[in-house]
Image (spheres, helix red, strand yellow):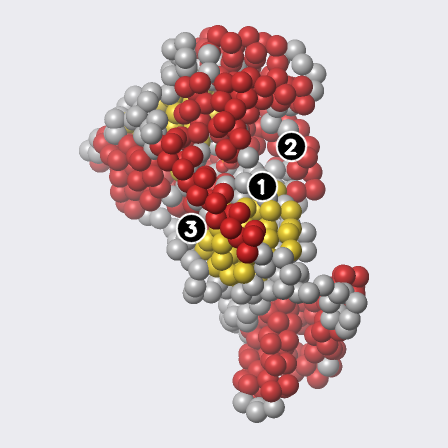
Amino acid sequence: MAKNPQEERVFHGSPVSRGIAFGPLHVSARGFSAPDVYAISEEEIPLEKERLQAAFKRTRQQLSELKERIDKIADGDEGLVFEAHGMVLDDPSLLKKVEQSIEERKQNAEYCFYAIMQTFLEGMRRISDPYLRERTIDIEDVSQRVLRNFQAKLDILLPDHQHLLVAHDLTPSDTASMDRSKLLGFVTEAGSVNSHTAILARALGIPAIVGLENVVLETTTLAPAILDGYSGKFIIYPSEKTTEYYQALAARKKEAREDLEKLRDRESTTLDGRHITLSANIEFVDELDLVAETRAEGVGLFRTEFYLLESRRTRSEADQTTTYTELAQKTHPHLTIIRTLDSGGDKLSTEPLTEPEPNPFLGWRGIRVSLDRPEFFKEQLRAILRASAHGKIGLMFPFISGLSEVRACKALIKECMVELDQEGSSYDPKLQIGAMIEIPSAALIAEEIAREVDFFSIGTNDLIQYTLAVDRINNNVAKLYRSSHPSVIRLIKMTTDAARDAKIWTGICGELAADLNLTPLLLGLGVDELSVGPRELPAVRKALLSLDYAKCQKLAQEALSLPTSAEVFELSRAAALEAYGDLIAESE
Ligand code: PEP
Ligand code: MG
Protein backbone atom coordinates (compact mmCIF):
# COMPACT_ATOMS: atom_id res chain seq x y z
CA MET A 1 0.00 0.00 0.00
CA ALA A 2 1.09 3.55 -0.56
CA LYS A 3 0.39 4.66 3.00
CA ASN A 4 1.78 3.41 6.28
CA PRO A 5 -1.06 1.03 7.21
CA GLN A 6 -0.84 1.93 10.90
CA GLU A 7 -1.10 5.66 10.43
CA GLU A 8 -4.20 7.40 11.85
CA ARG A 9 -7.02 7.40 9.35
CA VAL A 10 -10.42 9.08 9.57
CA PHE A 11 -13.60 7.89 7.85
CA HIS A 12 -16.71 10.05 7.74
CA GLY A 13 -20.26 8.69 7.81
CA SER A 14 -23.72 9.49 9.14
CA PRO A 15 -23.95 9.23 12.93
CA VAL A 16 -27.07 7.27 13.89
CA SER A 17 -26.56 6.54 17.57
CA ARG A 18 -24.73 8.93 19.88
CA GLY A 19 -21.80 8.02 22.06
CA ILE A 20 -18.05 7.62 21.88
CA ALA A 21 -16.54 4.17 21.88
CA PHE A 22 -12.95 2.97 21.92
CA GLY A 23 -11.92 -0.55 21.08
CA PRO A 24 -10.36 -3.12 18.83
CA LEU A 25 -12.15 -3.75 15.57
CA HIS A 26 -13.88 -6.82 14.42
CA VAL A 27 -14.36 -6.78 10.67
CA SER A 28 -17.27 -8.99 9.81
CA ALA A 29 -16.25 -10.50 6.53
CA ARG A 30 -14.40 -13.50 7.80
CA GLY A 31 -15.38 -16.83 9.24
CA PHE A 32 -16.72 -20.06 7.91
CA SER A 33 -19.79 -21.49 9.54
CA ALA A 34 -22.00 -24.40 8.65
CA PRO A 35 -25.16 -23.61 6.71
CA ASP A 36 -28.45 -25.37 7.37
CA VAL A 37 -28.67 -28.84 5.95
CA TYR A 38 -31.79 -30.32 4.44
CA ALA A 39 -32.75 -33.23 2.19
CA ILE A 40 -33.76 -32.70 -1.42
CA SER A 41 -35.69 -34.91 -3.81
CA GLU A 42 -34.36 -36.46 -7.04
CA GLU A 43 -36.23 -33.80 -9.06
CA GLU A 44 -34.61 -30.98 -7.12
CA ILE A 45 -31.04 -32.02 -7.98
CA PRO A 46 -30.79 -29.89 -11.17
CA LEU A 47 -32.13 -26.87 -9.28
CA GLU A 48 -29.53 -27.27 -6.53
CA LYS A 49 -26.80 -27.48 -9.18
CA GLU A 50 -28.06 -24.27 -10.68
CA ARG A 51 -27.99 -22.59 -7.26
CA LEU A 52 -24.42 -23.74 -6.82
CA GLN A 53 -23.35 -22.36 -10.19
CA ALA A 54 -25.12 -19.08 -9.54
CA ALA A 55 -23.38 -18.68 -6.15
CA PHE A 56 -20.00 -19.37 -7.81
CA LYS A 57 -20.78 -16.86 -10.52
CA ARG A 58 -21.79 -14.12 -8.09
CA THR A 59 -18.69 -14.76 -6.02
CA ARG A 60 -16.36 -14.51 -9.05
CA GLN A 61 -18.01 -11.27 -10.03
CA GLN A 62 -17.60 -9.78 -6.53
CA LEU A 63 -13.98 -10.87 -6.39
CA SER A 64 -13.12 -9.20 -9.65
CA GLU A 65 -14.87 -6.01 -8.50
CA LEU A 66 -12.89 -6.12 -5.28
CA LYS A 67 -9.66 -6.57 -7.21
CA GLU A 68 -10.50 -3.55 -9.33
CA ARG A 69 -11.25 -1.42 -6.27
CA ILE A 70 -8.03 -2.49 -4.56
CA ASP A 71 -5.97 -1.85 -7.70
CA LYS A 72 -7.29 1.70 -7.73
CA ILE A 73 -6.25 2.49 -4.17
CA ALA A 74 -3.08 0.42 -3.80
CA ASP A 75 0.10 0.59 -5.79
CA GLY A 76 1.34 -2.94 -5.08
CA ASP A 77 0.11 -6.44 -5.70
CA GLU A 78 -2.58 -6.39 -3.03
CA GLY A 79 -5.42 -7.00 -5.46
CA LEU A 80 -3.90 -10.31 -6.52
CA VAL A 81 -5.23 -11.97 -3.41
CA PHE A 82 -8.74 -11.70 -4.84
CA GLU A 83 -7.56 -13.11 -8.11
CA ALA A 84 -6.17 -16.04 -6.14
CA HIS A 85 -9.51 -16.43 -4.38
CA GLY A 86 -11.23 -16.53 -7.74
CA MET A 87 -8.88 -19.25 -8.90
CA VAL A 88 -10.10 -21.53 -6.13
CA LEU A 89 -13.50 -21.42 -7.79
CA ASP A 90 -12.10 -21.79 -11.30
CA ASP A 91 -10.85 -25.27 -10.51
CA PRO A 92 -13.34 -27.40 -12.52
CA SER A 93 -12.83 -30.39 -10.28
CA LEU A 94 -14.28 -28.48 -7.30
CA LEU A 95 -17.56 -27.78 -9.08
CA LYS A 96 -17.72 -31.38 -10.23
CA LYS A 97 -17.07 -32.73 -6.75
CA VAL A 98 -19.83 -30.64 -5.21
CA GLU A 99 -22.28 -31.57 -7.97
CA GLN A 100 -21.48 -35.21 -7.44
CA SER A 101 -21.99 -34.80 -3.72
CA ILE A 102 -25.43 -33.20 -4.30
CA GLU A 103 -26.41 -36.23 -6.40
CA GLU A 104 -25.13 -38.76 -3.90
CA ARG A 105 -26.07 -37.18 -0.57
CA LYS A 106 -29.31 -35.61 -1.86
CA GLN A 107 -28.70 -32.60 0.33
CA ASN A 108 -28.84 -28.90 -0.41
CA ALA A 109 -26.04 -27.37 -2.47
CA GLU A 110 -24.61 -25.05 0.18
CA TYR A 111 -24.25 -27.86 2.66
CA CYS A 112 -22.52 -30.14 0.12
CA PHE A 113 -20.17 -27.30 -0.76
CA TYR A 114 -19.48 -26.62 2.91
CA ALA A 115 -18.75 -30.26 3.69
CA ILE A 116 -16.24 -30.57 0.85
CA MET A 117 -14.45 -27.32 1.73
CA GLN A 118 -14.36 -28.24 5.38
CA THR A 119 -12.67 -31.57 4.71
CA PHE A 120 -10.22 -29.85 2.39
CA LEU A 121 -9.42 -27.17 4.97
CA GLU A 122 -8.89 -29.71 7.70
CA GLY A 123 -6.31 -31.42 5.50
CA MET A 124 -4.58 -28.13 4.80
CA ARG A 125 -4.40 -27.15 8.45
CA ARG A 126 -2.39 -30.29 9.15
CA ILE A 127 0.32 -29.29 6.66
CA SER A 128 3.42 -27.96 8.39
CA ASP A 129 4.42 -25.54 5.60
CA PRO A 130 3.52 -22.07 7.04
CA TYR A 131 2.83 -20.62 3.58
CA LEU A 132 0.24 -23.28 2.84
CA ARG A 133 -1.28 -22.93 6.29
CA GLU A 134 -1.70 -19.22 5.65
CA ARG A 135 -3.63 -20.07 2.54
CA THR A 136 -6.37 -21.70 4.62
CA ILE A 137 -7.50 -18.20 5.56
CA ASP A 138 -7.95 -17.35 1.89
CA ILE A 139 -9.86 -20.53 1.27
CA GLU A 140 -12.06 -19.93 4.29
CA ASP A 141 -12.72 -16.44 3.08
CA VAL A 142 -13.75 -17.44 -0.39
CA SER A 143 -15.82 -20.34 0.94
CA GLN A 144 -17.68 -18.05 3.30
CA ARG A 145 -18.29 -15.65 0.45
CA VAL A 146 -19.79 -18.44 -1.64
CA LEU A 147 -22.01 -19.47 1.26
CA ARG A 148 -23.21 -15.93 1.74
CA ASN A 149 -24.03 -15.79 -1.92
CA PHE A 150 -26.52 -18.59 -1.55
CA GLN A 151 -28.58 -16.27 0.59
CA ALA A 152 -29.08 -12.55 0.96
CA LYS A 153 -28.64 -12.50 4.72
CA LEU A 154 -25.36 -11.47 6.26
CA ASP A 155 -23.95 -14.21 8.39
CA ILE A 156 -22.38 -12.59 11.37
CA LEU A 157 -19.91 -14.32 13.60
CA LEU A 158 -18.89 -12.18 16.51
CA PRO A 159 -15.84 -12.51 18.74
CA ASP A 160 -15.95 -13.21 22.41
CA HIS A 161 -14.21 -10.01 23.52
CA GLN A 162 -15.32 -6.37 23.53
CA HIS A 163 -15.06 -4.89 20.08
CA LEU A 164 -16.24 -2.32 17.57
CA LEU A 165 -17.97 -4.08 14.73
CA VAL A 166 -17.35 -3.18 11.08
CA ALA A 167 -19.83 -4.67 8.62
CA HIS A 168 -21.21 -3.98 5.20
CA ASP A 169 -24.74 -3.89 6.57
CA LEU A 170 -26.67 -5.20 9.53
CA THR A 171 -30.25 -6.32 9.58
CA PRO A 172 -32.51 -5.33 12.48
CA SER A 173 -32.41 -8.96 13.62
CA ASP A 174 -28.58 -8.99 13.54
CA THR A 175 -28.60 -5.89 15.72
CA ALA A 176 -31.29 -7.16 18.05
CA SER A 177 -29.45 -10.41 18.67
CA MET A 178 -26.02 -8.93 19.41
CA ASP A 179 -24.36 -9.43 22.76
CA ARG A 180 -24.49 -5.94 24.20
CA SER A 181 -21.76 -6.63 26.73
CA LYS A 182 -19.29 -7.32 23.92
CA LEU A 183 -20.40 -4.89 21.25
CA LEU A 184 -19.05 -1.40 22.01
CA GLY A 185 -20.30 0.17 18.78
CA PHE A 186 -20.71 -0.55 15.09
CA VAL A 187 -20.08 1.06 11.74
CA THR A 188 -21.53 -0.03 8.43
CA GLU A 189 -21.13 0.83 4.78
CA ALA A 190 -24.88 0.74 4.12
CA GLY A 191 -27.78 1.85 6.32
CA SER A 192 -29.52 5.06 7.26
CA VAL A 193 -30.66 7.09 10.25
CA ASN A 194 -34.28 5.89 10.23
CA SER A 195 -33.70 2.22 9.53
CA HIS A 196 -34.78 -0.14 12.29
CA THR A 197 -31.16 -1.13 12.68
CA ALA A 198 -30.36 2.47 13.66
CA ILE A 199 -33.43 2.72 15.90
CA LEU A 200 -32.35 -0.45 17.68
CA ALA A 201 -28.81 0.84 18.11
CA ARG A 202 -30.20 3.92 19.82
CA ALA A 203 -32.51 1.78 21.96
CA LEU A 204 -29.62 -0.39 23.02
CA GLY A 205 -27.33 2.60 23.59
CA ILE A 206 -24.78 1.29 21.09
CA PRO A 207 -22.89 4.14 19.36
CA ALA A 208 -23.15 3.68 15.61
CA ILE A 209 -22.27 5.24 12.27
CA VAL A 210 -23.61 4.23 8.86
CA GLY A 211 -22.71 5.10 5.30
CA LEU A 212 -18.93 4.66 5.65
CA GLU A 213 -17.79 3.80 2.16
CA ASN A 214 -15.36 0.90 1.74
CA VAL A 215 -14.86 0.58 5.47
CA VAL A 216 -14.99 -3.22 5.39
CA LEU A 217 -12.28 -3.41 2.80
CA GLU A 218 -10.05 -0.82 4.37
CA THR A 219 -9.98 -1.95 7.99
CA THR A 220 -8.47 -4.92 9.75
CA THR A 221 -9.71 -6.99 12.65
CA LEU A 222 -8.05 -6.01 15.94
CA ALA A 223 -6.90 -2.59 14.70
CA PRO A 224 -7.50 0.02 17.44
CA ALA A 225 -10.23 2.56 16.68
CA ILE A 226 -12.46 5.32 18.02
CA LEU A 227 -16.09 5.68 17.01
CA ASP A 228 -17.62 9.13 17.40
CA GLY A 229 -21.37 8.67 17.20
CA TYR A 230 -21.93 12.46 17.48
CA SER A 231 -20.01 13.69 14.46
CA GLY A 232 -19.89 10.47 12.42
CA LYS A 233 -16.11 10.21 12.51
CA PHE A 234 -14.53 6.81 12.68
CA ILE A 235 -10.81 6.82 13.37
CA ILE A 236 -8.54 3.84 13.01
CA TYR A 237 -5.06 3.76 14.52
CA PRO A 238 -5.79 6.99 16.41
CA SER A 239 -2.75 8.99 17.48
CA GLU A 240 -2.12 9.68 21.14
CA LYS A 241 -3.34 13.23 20.66
CA THR A 242 -6.61 12.08 19.07
CA THR A 243 -7.17 9.52 21.81
CA GLU A 244 -6.66 12.17 24.49
CA TYR A 245 -9.06 14.51 22.71
CA TYR A 246 -11.77 11.84 22.61
CA GLN A 247 -11.21 10.79 26.20
CA ALA A 248 -11.82 14.38 27.26
CA LEU A 249 -14.85 14.69 24.98
CA ALA A 250 -16.36 11.46 26.35
CA ALA A 251 -15.92 12.80 29.89
CA ARG A 252 -17.62 16.09 28.94
CA LYS A 253 -20.57 14.31 27.35
CA LYS A 254 -20.95 12.18 30.45
CA GLU A 255 -21.09 15.29 32.61
CA ALA A 256 -23.70 16.84 30.34
CA ARG A 257 -25.81 13.69 30.62
CA GLU A 258 -25.55 13.78 34.38
CA ASP A 259 -26.68 17.43 34.39
CA LEU A 260 -29.74 16.46 32.38
CA GLU A 261 -30.55 13.68 34.79
CA LYS A 262 -30.93 16.27 37.53
CA LEU A 263 -34.11 17.44 35.79
CA ARG A 264 -35.70 14.04 35.81
CA ASP A 265 -38.26 14.80 38.48
CA ARG A 266 -39.51 17.89 36.70
CA GLU A 267 -42.84 17.63 34.87
CA SER A 268 -42.46 18.12 31.12
CA THR A 269 -44.34 21.39 31.09
CA THR A 270 -43.54 24.48 29.02
CA LEU A 271 -42.68 27.87 30.54
CA ASP A 272 -46.29 28.97 30.06
CA GLY A 273 -47.77 25.84 31.58
CA ARG A 274 -48.66 23.45 28.76
CA HIS A 275 -48.02 19.88 29.80
CA ILE A 276 -46.73 17.49 27.15
CA THR A 277 -46.74 13.81 28.00
CA LEU A 278 -43.18 12.59 27.56
CA SER A 279 -43.16 8.86 27.17
CA ALA A 280 -40.70 6.24 25.99
CA ASN A 281 -40.36 4.01 22.96
CA ILE A 282 -39.13 0.53 23.72
CA GLU A 283 -38.31 -2.58 21.75
CA PHE A 284 -37.30 -4.87 24.59
CA VAL A 285 -38.96 -5.46 27.93
CA ASP A 286 -35.64 -5.14 29.73
CA GLU A 287 -35.55 -1.47 28.75
CA LEU A 288 -38.21 -0.82 31.38
CA ASP A 289 -35.65 -0.18 34.11
CA LEU A 290 -34.13 2.60 32.05
CA VAL A 291 -37.62 3.95 31.33
CA ALA A 292 -38.28 4.10 35.07
CA GLU A 293 -34.93 5.81 35.69
CA THR A 294 -35.69 8.56 33.20
CA ARG A 295 -39.12 9.07 34.81
CA ALA A 296 -40.89 8.74 31.49
CA GLU A 297 -44.62 9.18 31.73
CA GLY A 298 -45.31 5.70 30.46
CA VAL A 299 -44.49 3.83 27.29
CA GLY A 300 -45.73 5.54 24.15
CA LEU A 301 -44.72 2.74 21.84
CA PHE A 302 -43.80 -0.85 22.52
CA ARG A 303 -42.78 -2.29 19.16
CA THR A 304 -43.82 -5.89 19.69
CA GLU A 305 -42.25 -7.31 16.54
CA PHE A 306 -38.76 -7.75 18.01
CA TYR A 307 -40.18 -9.44 21.06
CA LEU A 308 -42.53 -11.63 19.02
CA LEU A 309 -40.14 -12.65 16.31
CA GLU A 310 -36.74 -12.50 17.99
CA SER A 311 -34.76 -15.64 17.20
CA ARG A 312 -37.81 -16.79 15.24
CA ARG A 313 -39.27 -18.25 18.39
CA THR A 314 -42.99 -17.99 18.40
CA ARG A 315 -44.49 -16.62 21.56
CA SER A 316 -47.47 -18.41 22.94
CA GLU A 317 -50.54 -16.50 24.02
CA ALA A 318 -49.70 -17.31 27.64
CA ASP A 319 -46.14 -15.99 27.19
CA GLN A 320 -47.48 -12.81 25.67
CA THR A 321 -49.97 -12.35 28.48
CA THR A 322 -47.16 -12.61 31.04
CA THR A 323 -44.98 -10.08 29.21
CA TYR A 324 -47.70 -7.52 28.59
CA THR A 325 -48.89 -7.86 32.18
CA GLU A 326 -45.36 -7.22 33.42
CA LEU A 327 -45.26 -4.11 31.25
CA ALA A 328 -48.60 -2.88 32.55
CA GLN A 329 -47.59 -3.45 36.15
CA LYS A 330 -44.14 -1.90 35.88
CA THR A 331 -45.37 1.20 34.10
CA HIS A 332 -48.31 1.70 36.44
CA PRO A 333 -49.83 4.27 37.04
CA HIS A 334 -48.84 5.46 33.58
CA LEU A 335 -50.12 4.26 30.24
CA THR A 336 -48.32 1.58 28.23
CA ILE A 337 -49.14 1.61 24.55
CA ILE A 338 -48.65 -1.78 22.99
CA ARG A 339 -48.46 -1.70 19.24
CA THR A 340 -49.59 -4.88 17.58
CA LEU A 341 -47.17 -6.71 15.32
CA ASP A 342 -45.64 -4.59 12.57
CA SER A 343 -43.71 -7.15 10.56
CA GLY A 344 -42.51 -6.79 6.98
CA GLY A 345 -40.81 -3.75 5.43
CA ASP A 346 -37.23 -3.86 6.69
CA LYS A 347 -38.21 -5.78 9.79
CA LEU A 348 -38.41 -9.45 10.50
CA SER A 349 -41.26 -11.17 8.81
CA THR A 350 -43.70 -13.55 10.38
CA GLU A 351 -43.34 -16.22 7.77
CA PRO A 352 -41.10 -16.87 4.83
CA LEU A 353 -42.73 -15.65 1.65
CA THR A 354 -42.47 -17.92 -1.35
CA GLU A 355 -40.90 -15.07 -3.27
CA PRO A 356 -39.19 -11.94 -2.01
CA GLU A 357 -41.44 -8.92 -2.32
CA PRO A 358 -40.30 -6.46 -4.98
CA ASN A 359 -41.34 -3.50 -2.80
CA PRO A 360 -41.44 -4.71 0.80
CA PHE A 361 -42.30 -1.28 2.20
CA LEU A 362 -45.39 -1.23 0.00
CA GLY A 363 -46.13 -4.86 0.57
CA TRP A 364 -47.35 -7.29 3.15
CA ARG A 365 -46.58 -5.27 6.25
CA GLY A 366 -48.07 -4.25 9.57
CA ILE A 367 -51.79 -4.50 10.03
CA ARG A 368 -52.17 -6.15 6.61
CA VAL A 369 -50.32 -9.22 7.87
CA SER A 370 -52.26 -9.28 11.14
CA LEU A 371 -55.67 -8.99 9.45
CA ASP A 372 -54.74 -11.76 7.02
CA ARG A 373 -53.76 -14.00 9.93
CA PRO A 374 -56.67 -13.44 12.35
CA GLU A 375 -55.93 -16.49 14.53
CA PHE A 376 -52.42 -15.28 15.23
CA PHE A 377 -53.58 -11.66 15.58
CA LYS A 378 -56.28 -12.61 18.06
CA GLU A 379 -53.73 -14.34 20.27
CA GLN A 380 -51.94 -11.04 20.58
CA LEU A 381 -55.15 -9.09 21.12
CA ARG A 382 -56.37 -11.44 23.87
CA ALA A 383 -53.00 -11.27 25.61
CA ILE A 384 -53.05 -7.46 25.52
CA LEU A 385 -56.63 -7.40 26.79
CA ARG A 386 -55.81 -9.70 29.70
CA ALA A 387 -52.88 -7.45 30.64
CA SER A 388 -55.23 -4.46 30.67
CA ALA A 389 -56.76 -5.83 33.88
CA HIS A 390 -53.43 -5.16 35.64
CA GLY A 391 -52.58 -1.62 34.58
CA LYS A 392 -53.27 1.10 32.07
CA ILE A 393 -52.91 -0.33 28.59
CA GLY A 394 -53.36 1.32 25.20
CA LEU A 395 -53.71 -0.87 22.13
CA MET A 396 -52.36 0.58 18.91
CA PHE A 397 -52.48 -0.53 15.29
CA PRO A 398 -49.61 0.06 12.87
CA PHE A 399 -49.72 0.82 9.17
CA ILE A 400 -53.33 1.91 8.98
CA SER A 401 -54.20 3.13 5.49
CA GLY A 402 -57.97 3.44 5.77
CA LEU A 403 -61.08 3.22 7.87
CA SER A 404 -62.00 -0.36 7.02
CA GLU A 405 -58.80 -1.63 8.62
CA VAL A 406 -59.58 0.22 11.85
CA ARG A 407 -63.09 -1.20 11.85
CA ALA A 408 -61.84 -4.71 11.16
CA CYS A 409 -59.42 -4.42 14.08
CA LYS A 410 -62.14 -3.20 16.39
CA ALA A 411 -64.43 -6.06 15.36
CA LEU A 412 -61.68 -8.53 16.26
CA ILE A 413 -61.19 -6.82 19.63
CA LYS A 414 -64.92 -7.27 20.28
CA GLU A 415 -64.71 -10.95 19.37
CA CYS A 416 -61.77 -11.35 21.74
CA MET A 417 -63.66 -9.61 24.53
CA VAL A 418 -66.56 -12.04 24.13
CA GLU A 419 -64.12 -14.97 24.24
CA LEU A 420 -62.51 -13.62 27.40
CA ASP A 421 -65.93 -13.15 28.97
CA GLN A 422 -66.71 -16.77 28.19
CA GLU A 423 -63.51 -18.02 29.79
CA GLY A 424 -64.03 -15.71 32.77
CA SER A 425 -60.88 -13.63 32.23
CA SER A 426 -60.96 -9.99 33.16
CA TYR A 427 -59.85 -7.05 31.07
CA ASP A 428 -60.42 -3.33 30.90
CA PRO A 429 -63.43 -2.85 28.58
CA LYS A 430 -62.51 0.82 28.21
CA LEU A 431 -58.88 0.40 27.26
CA GLN A 432 -57.71 3.09 24.86
CA ILE A 433 -57.52 2.10 21.21
CA GLY A 434 -55.28 4.07 18.88
CA ALA A 435 -54.31 4.25 15.24
CA MET A 436 -50.86 5.02 13.98
CA ILE A 437 -50.88 7.78 11.44
CA GLU A 438 -47.95 6.86 9.28
CA ILE A 439 -49.39 6.57 5.80
CA PRO A 440 -50.47 9.82 4.10
CA SER A 441 -53.89 8.35 3.28
CA ALA A 442 -54.57 7.98 7.01
CA ALA A 443 -53.54 11.57 7.73
CA LEU A 444 -55.80 12.78 4.92
CA ILE A 445 -58.81 11.03 6.44
CA ALA A 446 -57.80 11.66 10.05
CA GLU A 447 -61.20 13.25 10.65
CA GLU A 448 -63.00 9.98 9.89
CA ILE A 449 -60.50 7.80 11.75
CA ALA A 450 -60.66 10.09 14.79
CA ARG A 451 -64.31 9.09 15.29
CA GLU A 452 -63.28 5.45 15.68
CA VAL A 453 -60.33 5.68 18.08
CA ASP A 454 -59.18 7.19 21.37
CA PHE A 455 -55.84 8.51 20.23
CA PHE A 456 -53.48 8.99 17.31
CA SER A 457 -49.78 8.33 17.33
CA ILE A 458 -47.97 9.77 14.36
CA GLY A 459 -45.29 7.45 13.01
CA THR A 460 -43.16 10.04 11.31
CA ASN A 461 -40.48 7.56 10.25
CA ASP A 462 -42.93 6.06 7.83
CA LEU A 463 -45.05 9.14 7.25
CA ILE A 464 -42.01 10.94 5.83
CA GLN A 465 -40.98 7.93 3.76
CA TYR A 466 -44.41 7.50 2.18
CA THR A 467 -45.15 11.20 1.73
CA LEU A 468 -41.86 12.01 0.04
CA ALA A 469 -41.37 8.63 -1.68
CA VAL A 470 -37.97 8.33 -0.02
CA ASP A 471 -36.95 4.91 1.21
CA ARG A 472 -36.06 5.32 4.88
CA ILE A 473 -33.27 2.77 4.71
CA ASN A 474 -31.61 3.84 1.48
CA ASN A 475 -28.61 6.00 2.13
CA ASN A 476 -28.47 7.15 -1.52
CA VAL A 477 -31.61 9.17 -1.01
CA ALA A 478 -31.02 10.11 2.64
CA LYS A 479 -30.62 13.78 1.76
CA LEU A 480 -34.18 13.81 0.41
CA TYR A 481 -35.59 12.44 3.66
CA ARG A 482 -36.73 15.77 5.09
CA SER A 483 -38.61 15.76 8.37
CA SER A 484 -39.44 19.44 8.00
CA HIS A 485 -40.87 19.14 4.48
CA PRO A 486 -43.94 21.40 4.18
CA SER A 487 -46.06 18.42 3.11
CA VAL A 488 -45.13 16.48 6.23
CA ILE A 489 -45.85 19.29 8.64
CA ARG A 490 -49.18 19.97 6.97
CA LEU A 491 -50.13 16.31 7.39
CA ILE A 492 -49.17 16.49 11.06
CA LYS A 493 -51.34 19.60 11.43
CA MET A 494 -54.29 17.89 9.73
CA THR A 495 -53.93 15.06 12.20
CA THR A 496 -53.74 17.21 15.34
CA ASP A 497 -56.66 19.35 14.11
CA ALA A 498 -58.83 16.29 13.46
CA ALA A 499 -57.93 14.87 16.87
CA ARG A 500 -58.71 18.11 18.70
CA ASP A 501 -62.11 18.35 16.97
CA ALA A 502 -62.93 14.77 17.95
CA LYS A 503 -61.61 15.38 21.50
CA ILE A 504 -58.93 12.75 21.30
CA TRP A 505 -55.18 13.18 21.80
CA THR A 506 -52.25 12.99 19.39
CA GLY A 507 -48.71 11.85 20.03
CA ILE A 508 -45.64 11.42 17.87
CA CYS A 509 -43.64 8.23 18.26
CA GLY A 510 -41.37 8.48 15.20
CA GLU A 511 -37.73 9.51 15.57
CA LEU A 512 -38.71 13.08 14.77
CA ALA A 513 -40.13 13.36 18.30
CA ALA A 514 -36.56 13.47 19.61
CA ASP A 515 -35.21 15.97 17.07
CA LEU A 516 -34.37 18.92 19.30
CA ASN A 517 -34.19 21.30 16.34
CA LEU A 518 -37.84 20.66 15.59
CA THR A 519 -39.29 20.49 19.12
CA PRO A 520 -40.61 24.11 18.91
CA LEU A 521 -42.40 23.27 15.66
CA LEU A 522 -43.95 20.01 16.92
CA LEU A 523 -45.13 21.68 20.08
CA GLY A 524 -46.67 24.50 18.08
CA LEU A 525 -48.42 22.04 15.75
CA GLY A 526 -50.44 20.90 18.74
CA VAL A 527 -49.17 17.47 19.70
CA ASP A 528 -50.06 16.29 23.21
CA GLU A 529 -47.45 13.61 23.61
CA LEU A 530 -43.88 12.91 22.46
CA SER A 531 -42.63 9.37 22.71
CA VAL A 532 -38.88 8.99 22.33
CA GLY A 533 -36.09 6.53 23.04
CA PRO A 534 -35.36 6.48 26.79
CA ARG A 535 -31.80 7.65 26.19
CA GLU A 536 -33.04 10.71 24.33
CA LEU A 537 -35.78 11.54 26.77
CA PRO A 538 -33.82 13.73 29.25
CA ALA A 539 -32.76 16.15 26.48
CA VAL A 540 -36.32 16.42 25.13
CA ARG A 541 -37.55 17.13 28.65
CA LYS A 542 -35.10 20.00 28.97
CA ALA A 543 -36.19 21.36 25.58
CA LEU A 544 -39.85 21.32 26.63
CA LEU A 545 -39.05 23.01 29.93
CA SER A 546 -37.31 25.81 28.03
CA LEU A 547 -40.04 26.59 25.50
CA ASP A 548 -43.05 28.86 25.48
CA TYR A 549 -46.11 27.19 23.97
CA ALA A 550 -47.77 30.40 22.78
CA LYS A 551 -44.60 31.38 20.91
CA CYS A 552 -44.35 27.91 19.39
CA GLN A 553 -47.94 28.14 18.15
CA LYS A 554 -47.10 31.34 16.31
CA LEU A 555 -43.97 29.74 14.93
CA ALA A 556 -45.95 26.74 13.66
CA GLN A 557 -48.46 29.05 12.00
CA GLU A 558 -45.63 30.76 10.16
CA ALA A 559 -43.97 27.44 9.31
CA LEU A 560 -47.17 26.19 7.66
CA SER A 561 -46.92 29.00 5.14
CA LEU A 562 -43.29 28.35 4.20
CA PRO A 563 -42.59 26.63 0.89
CA THR A 564 -39.39 24.66 1.56
CA SER A 565 -38.06 22.24 4.16
CA ALA A 566 -34.94 24.36 4.64
CA GLU A 567 -36.97 27.42 5.61
CA VAL A 568 -39.15 25.43 8.00
CA PHE A 569 -36.09 23.84 9.56
CA GLU A 570 -34.24 27.13 9.98
CA LEU A 571 -37.25 28.79 11.58
CA SER A 572 -37.61 26.07 14.17
CA ARG A 573 -33.87 25.67 14.74
CA ALA A 574 -33.50 29.38 15.42
CA ALA A 575 -36.17 29.15 18.14
CA ALA A 576 -34.50 26.03 19.55
CA LEU A 577 -31.08 27.70 19.63
CA GLU A 578 -32.54 30.68 21.40
CA ALA A 579 -34.29 28.59 24.02
CA TYR A 580 -31.66 25.86 24.62
CA GLY A 581 -28.58 26.48 22.49
CA ASP A 582 -26.30 24.69 24.96
CA LEU A 583 -28.38 21.54 24.71
CA ILE A 584 -28.23 21.57 20.91
CA ALA A 585 -24.46 22.09 21.02
CA GLU A 586 -24.06 19.10 23.35
CA SER A 587 -26.10 16.87 21.07
CA GLU A 588 -24.02 17.59 17.96
C1 PEP B 1 -42.80 5.21 12.58
O1 PEP B 1 -43.01 4.78 11.46
O2 PEP B 1 -42.52 6.41 12.83
C2 PEP B 1 -42.83 4.30 13.74
C3 PEP B 1 -42.76 4.76 14.98
O3 PEP B 1 -42.89 2.97 13.50
P1 PEP B 1 -41.66 2.10 12.96
O4 PEP B 1 -40.41 2.93 13.03
O5 PEP B 1 -41.58 0.90 13.82
O6 PEP B 1 -42.06 1.78 11.56
MG1 MG C 1 -43.84 2.83 11.20
CA separation, marks 2 and 1? 19 Å
Asked whether the beta carbons under mark 2 and mark 3 sit within 8 Å of each other, the answer is no
Q: Which residue is mark 2?
A: 481
**Does residue 355 appear left or right of residue 459 in this picture?**
right
Viewer-nearest of discs 2 and 3:
2
Disc 1 marks a residue whose amino acid type is Ser
Disc 2 marks a residue whose amino acid type is Tyr
The residue drawn where x is 54% and y is 40% is 230
Disc 3 marks a residue whose amino acid type is Glu
CA separation, marks 2 and 3? 29 Å
Which quadrant, please, contains the N terminus? bottom right
Say which mark, if any, is on residue 231. Answer: 1
The answer to whether residue 94 shows anywhere in this view is yes
The answer to whether residue 324 shows anywhere in this view is no
Does the beta carbon of the residue at mark 1 sit less than 8 Å from ligand 1? no
Say which mark, if any, is on residue 171. Answer: none
Q: Which residue is mark 3?
A: 310
The disc, 1 or 3, on the residue closer to the chain's N-terminal end is 1
Which quarter of the figure has residue 543? top left
Q: Is residue 1 above or below residue 492?
A: below
Viewer-nearest of discs 2 and 1:
1
